[in-house]
Amino acid sequence: MSTEPVTVVARRVLDDRGDGAVRLGAGRAHGKAILLGEHAVVYGAPALAVPVPQLTAVAKARRVGGDGPDEISFAIAGLESPEVTSLPTDGLQHLVTEFRQRAAVTDPMRVDVLVDCAIPQGRGLGSSAACARAAVLALADAFDRRLDAGTVFDLVQASENVAHGRASGIDALATGATAPLIFRNGVGRELPVAMAGSARLSDPAGFDAVLVIADSGVSGSTRDAVELLRGAFERSPRTRDEFVSRVTSLTEAAAHDLLQGRVAEFGARLTENHRLLRDVGVSTDRIDRMVDAALAAGSPGAKISGGGLGGCMIALAGDRRESAAVVRGVRQAGAVRTWVVPMGRFAGHDD
Ligand code: PMV
């Protein structure tokens, strides 16, 4: 993998190259956290996810002039290192091919793309989907194409299928959502619950809570976790059916709790979903300890979030004071960093 300092590549992308740069496009997306339903969603269960607006992916695409053959360069600046890689992931490479087809680009694809991603990788926070979404939007802008929401989803999903194996599509959608999202079989619906960063800062029922997201510091491969379960479920279809059916009931009930503002009941369902994910083998000892620590600190519910085998856990808190206690507890149990996502009446202002 070739790397060079971010400033060099960024300058190459953002400065006029002097050989007739024709158009600069920009795109952005954000991280996400799955509240309930991960893994089961791959088998047709519903899942609930929230946008995490403070974790951003921003892309710039600059078309360059000249009549030569296709010349596509990617530069990806990440949170983890001050360097960028100029080697695109297979997913991003695939995305460019798909973009050319879906957007009916007939000119040579001569473009430099810089993706600046503040979302840590391998933590179940939607980093690959958010990078792909930001890149699609930047390419569409640079090539002056208006893509409808379905086409953007399809392009991100094509890239995710390369990155994840068989992706359900929840990340492709949630990284562009502005409210909690219930997702099933490729179709998502945003729920009227206020979140920071969205235009809707009050909601009818008032799901007033603070979500704490905590990073276990260990990277987990979603592809490996999905494969692990696929193997286990092939050996025992009964385990699969029970898992999918119990997660379906929990997620449907949790969506009602969210709409009715029932924080304690919602929390209990999170913890129950954690037990199911732990029992099928995608949690880790450290995440189990972080879940226990959050509950001991007064959280109404906590669970692993995303693909697992590492990554993040989420814990609910009733208010900001409770969230501070939960943050202390999970850090003592091994969390290396935390993010706080206010919901309902906490979303619009500091309490
Ligand atoms: O990107 P992650 O780690 O949050 O995983 C997405 C959720 C899975 O259900 C594990 C996979 C999928 O494609 O839905």
Image (spheres, rainbow, N blue to C red):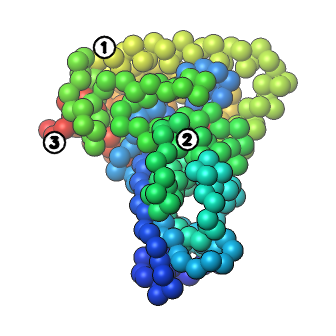
Picture coordinates of residue 200 (x, y %)?
Answer: 24, 32
Give the residue type at disc 1.
Gln
- Label 2, secondary structure: give it: helix
Identify the residue position indicated by label 2 in the image. Answer: 151
Q: Residue at x 51, y 85 (%)?
A: 19
> What distance separates the C-alpha of mark 1 from that of mark 3?
23 Å
Q: Which mark is nearer the camera, 2 or 3?
A: 2
Circle 1 crowding by C-alpha within 10 Å: few under 14, some 14–19, many from 20 = some
Identify the residue position indicated by label 3 in the image. Answer: 350
Q: Which mark is nearer the camera, 1 or 2?
A: 2
First-in-chain label (1 vs 3): 1
> What distance separates the C-alpha of mark 2 from that of mark 3?
37 Å
Q: Residue at x 43, y 42 (%)?
A: 176
Q: In which quadrant of the rendered image does the N terminus lie?
A: bottom right
Circle 2 crowding by C-alpha within 10 Å: few under 14, some 14–19, many from 20 = some
Circle 3 crowding by C-alpha within 10 Å: few under 14, some 14–19, many from 20 = few
First-in-chain label (1 vs 2): 2
First-in-chain label (2 vs 3): 2
Q: Residue at x 65, y 45 (%)?
A: 158
Q: In which quadrant of the rendered image does the C terminus lie?
A: top left
Residue 228: image quadrant is top right
User: Would residue 26 be found to the left or right of residue 75 on screen?
Assistant: left
Q: Of residues 335 and 93, which is closer to you in this image?
A: 93
User: Would residue 194 be found to the left or right of residue 274 on screen?
Assistant: left
Residue 244: image quadrant is top right
> What distance separates the C-alpha of mark 1 from that of mark 2?
33 Å
Identify the residue position indicated by label 1 in the image. Answer: 260
User: Would residue 195 be found to the left or right of residue 332 on screen?
Assistant: left
Q: Residue at x 23, y 18 (%)?
A: 204
The answer to whether residue 275 shows anywhere in this view is no
Give the residue type at disc 3.
Asp
Picture coordinates of residue 9 (x, y %)?
Answer: 51, 79
